[in-house]
């Protein structure tokens, strides 16, 4: 770090330089993705970059600018990311539309539950030092309850997309192998696949949230004399519980929504082709 005092420069060691190692990790990630995935890996890399671009260059500047509905911005950006991701990875077909619309449906349900939870549980969104610092300095006019809502939606988006494309792809393959299957048959097959995926993906989402605030869990666990009910009622704890549960419910609800929409598109496509 370089500091100046009355024209004199002084140098001191401020921190470790970590960026080179981040670049190495990113390079390894991209190389593994391309080596194993090939063209699909390249498309996956593209949608990751697109999602980061949409959040950092569109959503964040609009929030910082102020005057925009953060909840609406979040939902629109999430829908755009879902459609671009599914179309890029799977192409322009029935399973893509089923997966994309199923993702939007699951995220919408998670959003409704998140909004209700924030309102009835009186969550402030100021559950971290970063949020409090932003509120006191740069973003005094921003409603951090809406920022909390945005975080919940973005946190659940990836898992919901994963479940939706898994169900839609399975239905697509089943319908391709057995064209005589009816809408009900394809819908039930999607539900059965979704039930198998549901347990592991919900667990994945919960574990991801638990891992993110592991130091907080350790801090609370070390306070042996603190009553459990008081701990569970803390704003930061309730916020994380609401974040995990609303995202998981949205993920679960995406299963029947995706199965129904994909079955409709697949059966309609086959019927139109036969005519």
Image (tube, helix red, strand yellow):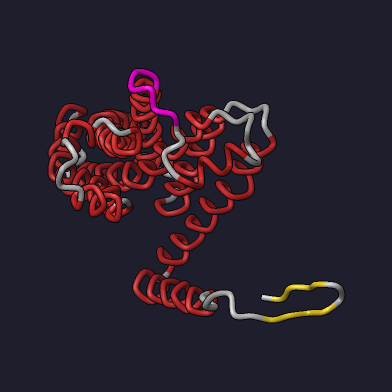
Q: Residue at x 73, y 80 (%)?
A: 10
**Is residue 177 on the magenta stretch?**
no
Q: What secondary structure is the magenta-colored segment mainly?
A: loop
Q: Which residues are magenta?
A: 119-124
Tell me if residue 35 comes above or below residue 266 in the rendering. Answer: below
Viewer-nearest residue: 106 or 182 = 106
Q: In this rendering, does residue 144 appear at all? A: yes
Tell me if residue 13 comes above or below residue 251 in the rendering. Answer: below
Quadrant of res 119:
top left
Q: Is residue 270 left or right of residue 46?
A: left
x and y percentages locating residue 6 in the rendered image = 85, 73
Q: In this rendering, does residue 254 appear at all? A: no
**Is residue 120 on the magenta stretch?**
yes
Quadrant of res 194:
top left
Tell me if residue 35 comes above or below residue 90 in the rendering. Answer: below
x and y percentages locating residue 151 in the rendered image = 44, 40
Viewer-nearest residue: 148 or 226 = 226
Q: Residue at x 39, y 27 (%)?
A: 123
Q: Residue at x 55, y 47 (%)?
A: 55
> In which quadrant of the rendered image does the N terminus lie?
bottom right
x and y percentages locating residue 218 in the rendered image = 23, 54
> In which quadrant of the rendered image does the C terminus lie?
top left
x and y percentages locating residue 138 in the rendered image = 65, 41
Q: Residue at x 63, y 49 (%)?
A: 57
Viewer-nearest residue: 249 or 17 = 17
């Amino acid at each position: 770090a370089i500091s100046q005092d009355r024209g004199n420069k002084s140098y001191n060691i401020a921190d470790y330089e970590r960026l080179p190692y981040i670049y190495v990790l990113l390079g390894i990630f991209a190389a593994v993705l391309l080596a194993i995935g090939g063209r699909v890996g390249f498309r996956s890399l593209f949608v990751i970059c697109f999602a980061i671009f949409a959040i950092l260059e569109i959503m964040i500047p609009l929030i910082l600018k102020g005057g925009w509905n953060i909840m609406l911005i979040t939902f629109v950006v999430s829908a755009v990311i879902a459609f671009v991701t599914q179309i890029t990875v799977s192409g322009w077909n029935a399973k893509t539309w089923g997966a994309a619309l199923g993702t939007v449906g699951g995220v919408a349900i998670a959003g409704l539950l998140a909004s209700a939870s924030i309102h009835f549980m009186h969550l402030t969104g100021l559950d971290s030092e970063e949020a409090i610092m932003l509120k006191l300095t740069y973003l005094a006019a921003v409603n951090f309850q809406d920022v909390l809502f945005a975080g919940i939606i973005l946190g659940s988006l990836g898992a919901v997309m994963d479940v939706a494309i898994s169900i839609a792809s399975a239905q697509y393959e089943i319908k391709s192998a057995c064209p005589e299957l009816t809408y009900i048959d394809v819908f039930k097959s999607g539900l059965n696949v979704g039930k198998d995926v549901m347990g592991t993906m919900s667990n994945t989402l919960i574990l991801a949230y638990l891992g993110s605030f592991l130091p907080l869990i350790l801090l609370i666990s070390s306070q042996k004399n603190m009553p459990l009910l008081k701990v569970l009622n803390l704003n930061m704890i309730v916020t994380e519980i609401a974040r995990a549960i609303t995202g998981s419910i949205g993920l679960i609800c995406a299963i029947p929504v995706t199965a129904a929409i994909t079955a409709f598109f697949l059966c309609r496509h086959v019927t139109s082709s036969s005519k």
